[in-house]
Amino acid sequence: MIAIVCRSSYLASTMSAMLCGERSMWFGTDDTMPDPRRRLSDALVKNRVSVVFYEPSFFVDPAPYRTMSPSTRFVVLAGPGEESSGRDALAFGAAAMLAKPVDTGAVNGVFQLVSV
């Protein structure tokens, strides 16, 4: 299972389509969903999540989540103006960083890299 933690349902659905049929869950924000960080925590404990793609506006340091699911890989999605946060996430243990806007080749390449 792949988790995508981002603000945009469009980005989440686009990334899901790029992941070649891998099952994914979106954790975002809107009026009907509780805190995406709490939902991600629950998913990491209850499901086998192999990769989490996340925006640094939700969290920069993936360490608390890695303790819940040590085999899960975290990939930060950094957009324009978030490069510093993306580098910080890498320093804190994110496996890779993808620049937004993302494209199919980059998503699949990083997914293959971190899924090994």
Image: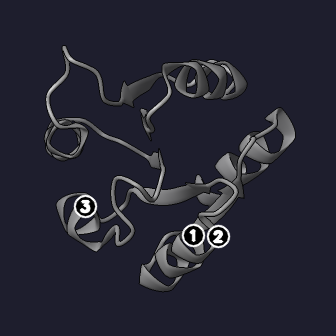
- Residue name at image x 70 percent, y 57 percent: 80
For residue 14, above or below residue 70: above
Q: Position of residue 81 (x, y in %)?
A: 64, 63
The local crowd at label 3, few if under 14, some if 14 to 19, many if 20 or more residues have their Cα within 10 Å, is some
Give the residue at mark 3.
Answer: 65
Label 1 amino acid? Gly
Element carrying mark 3: helix
| Front-most of residues 9 and 42 | 9
Give the residue at mark 2.
Answer: 83
Q: Is 56 left, or right, of 41 in this rendering? A: right
First in sequence, mark 2 or 3: give its number.
3
Element carrying mark 1: helix
Label 3 amino acid? Tyr
For residue 32, above or below residue 65: above
Numbered badge on residue 86:
1
Q: Quadrant of the C terminus?
A: bottom right
- Residue name at image x 34 percent, y 53 percent: 58
Element carrying mark 2: helix
Q: Which quadrant of the figure has residue 70?
A: bottom left
- Tell me the distance, in whole angstroms, between the alpha carbons under discs 3 and 1: 17 Å
